[in-house]
């Protein structure tokens, strides 16, 4: 059976650290906690689980801190987690079985990372991450922010999931500040970081700058296909904010050069069509979203395959005067997500229509 080092970097994680460590009980053979400057009782909490608690000065570089944590590992494999990550009990049990059965020739185990959830607690946004890495292979983190490890060698794609159950809001300006510090120091951003820099700019309402960065990223031809499709969507959203509807449509269409259509792209096409009053075309795009196959290894946004296009179809058919078809879409929504706020609103709306029909 393999042995596992759990390596974590933390800062001011007192409210969630114990929850994380309890959720992985029995999995790691050693726990390494690297604290980057906590002002709360994070290190006290950590000390209840391990005597390997280290201090590391924060220098606006996540990869540097994570690589330091990896340098302290001594087991066969390294598992990394953030303090607000948890393994649900079925996944913990599956991980324990994986630990017993893993072929030691495996270099990397990837796992789904659930990062957003609906009102029922079900994951609605997931993507695959490198999660368990063979220590002797010397894998290194790259990137001061949005850091990652490039998987290589023998890779196992496991269905065991890690859930990112965030409970506190981090500094919303941190990532943008790091990117701009790098640029001010003359550093050239990699294509991956150029994409994420564009997202940070857009998230801060700097749409002109973001649109420029996304365009440069796409024109470089060097990005990961999934990030290129995402950049098309983000570019479209920025252009819409700037009142450039035709250019926004063209940005969405550009995404079709990067593999099969994504459901979120189809929904965005539907939204643009609906805004222009082209309801038949909008219906086409929302139905297309529901038939898009999942992207292997890419970002999975489940809501764009069911509840979001169904809600929009409900609106389209209602505006077209086809209340029967609109209600049929609503019934599907109600079966899927009865507690969704929009579903509850529509339930009242259709109840009112039925009352009108009785008059």
Image (cartoon, rainbow, N blue to C red):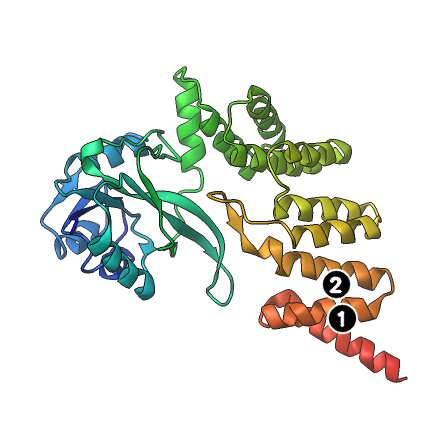
Residue 327: give its label.
1
Please determine whether, in this image, residue 141 is positioned above or below residue 111.
Answer: above
Farthest-out residue, bottom: 358
- Report how far apart the C-alphas of labels 1 and 2 lie in the structure: 7 Å
The x, y position of residue 203, in whole percent, is: 54, 39
The residue depicted at 71 percent of the width and 69 percent of the height is 330
Estimate how packed mark 1 is, as few (under 14), some (14 to 19) or many (20 or more) residues with alpha carbons within 10 Å. Answer: some
Q: Quadrant of residue 358?
A: bottom right
Farthest-out residue, top: 186
Q: Residue at (53%, 36%) from the top-left corner?
A: 226
**Residue 314: numbered disc:** 2
Q: Which residue is at the far right?
A: 359
Question: SS for tag 1?
Answer: helix
Q: Reading the chain from its start, which is encountered first: label 1 or label 2?
A: 2
Does 114 sit left or right of 89 as displayed?
Answer: right
Q: Is residue 94 above or below residue 82?
A: below
| Lateral position of residue 163 relative to residue 55, left or right | right
Q: Secondary structure at mark 2?
A: helix
* CB under 8 Å between discs 1 and 2: yes
Mark 2 Cα-neighbour bin, 10 Å: few <14, some 14–19, many ≥20:
many
x and y percentages locating residue 322 in the rendered image: 85, 66
Q: Residue at x 62, y 40 (%)?
A: 260
* Disc marking residue 221: none
Is residue 333 toward the left or the right of residue 321 in the image?
left
User: Residue shown at 29%/51% (left/top)?
Assistant: 83
| Residue 337 seen | no
Q: How many numbered marks does the figure carry? A: 2
What is the x, y in percent for residue 70? 20, 37
The quadrant where residue 350 appears: bottom right
Query: Quadrant location of the C terminus?
Result: bottom right
């Amino acid at each position: 059976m393999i042995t596992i080092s759990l390596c974590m970097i933390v800062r001011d994680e007192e409210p969630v650290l114990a929850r994380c460590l309890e959720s992985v009980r029995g999995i790691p053979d050693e726990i390494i906690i690297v604290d980057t400057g906590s002002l709360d009782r994070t290190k006290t909490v950590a000390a209840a689980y391990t005597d390997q608690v280290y201090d590391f000065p924060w220098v606006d570089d996540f990869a540097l801190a994570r690589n330091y944590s990896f340098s302290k590992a001594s087991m066969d494999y390294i598992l990394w987690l953030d303090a607000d990550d948890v393994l649900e009990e079925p996944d913990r049990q599956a991980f324990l079985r994986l630990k017993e059965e893993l072929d030691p020739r495996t270099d990397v185990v990837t796992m789904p990372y659930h990062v957003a959830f609906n009102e029922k607690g079900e994951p609605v946004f997931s993507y695959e991450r490198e999660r368990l890495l063979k220590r002797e292979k010397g894998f290194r983190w790259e990137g001061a922010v949005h850091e990652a490890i490039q998987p290589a060698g023998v890779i196992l794609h496991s269905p065991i999931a890690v859930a990112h159950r965030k409970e506190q809001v981090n500094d919303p300006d941190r990532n943008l500040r790091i990117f701009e510090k790098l640029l001010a120091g003359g550093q050239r951003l990699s294509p991956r970081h150029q994409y994420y820099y564009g997202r940070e700019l857009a998230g801060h309402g700097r749409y002109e700058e973001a649109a420029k960065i996304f365009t440069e990223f796409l024109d470089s031809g060097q990005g990961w296909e999934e990030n290129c499709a995402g950049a098309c969507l983000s570019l479209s959203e920025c252009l819409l904010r700037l009142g450039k509807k035709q250019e926004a449509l063209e940005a969405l269409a550009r995404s079709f050069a990067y593999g099969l259509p994504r459901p979120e792209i189809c929904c965005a096409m539907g939204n643009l069509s609906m805004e222009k009053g082209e309801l038949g075309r909008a219906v086409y795009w929302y139905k297309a979203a529901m038939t898009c196959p999942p992207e292997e290894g890419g970002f999975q946004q489940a809501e764009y395959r069911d509840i979001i296009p169904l809600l929009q179809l409900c609106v389209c058919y209602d505006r077209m005067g086809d209340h029967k078809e609109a209600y049929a879409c609503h019934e599907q929504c109600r079966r899927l997500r009865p507690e969704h706020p929009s579903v509850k609103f529509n339930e009242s709306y259709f109840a009112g229509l039925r009352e009108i029909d009785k008059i």
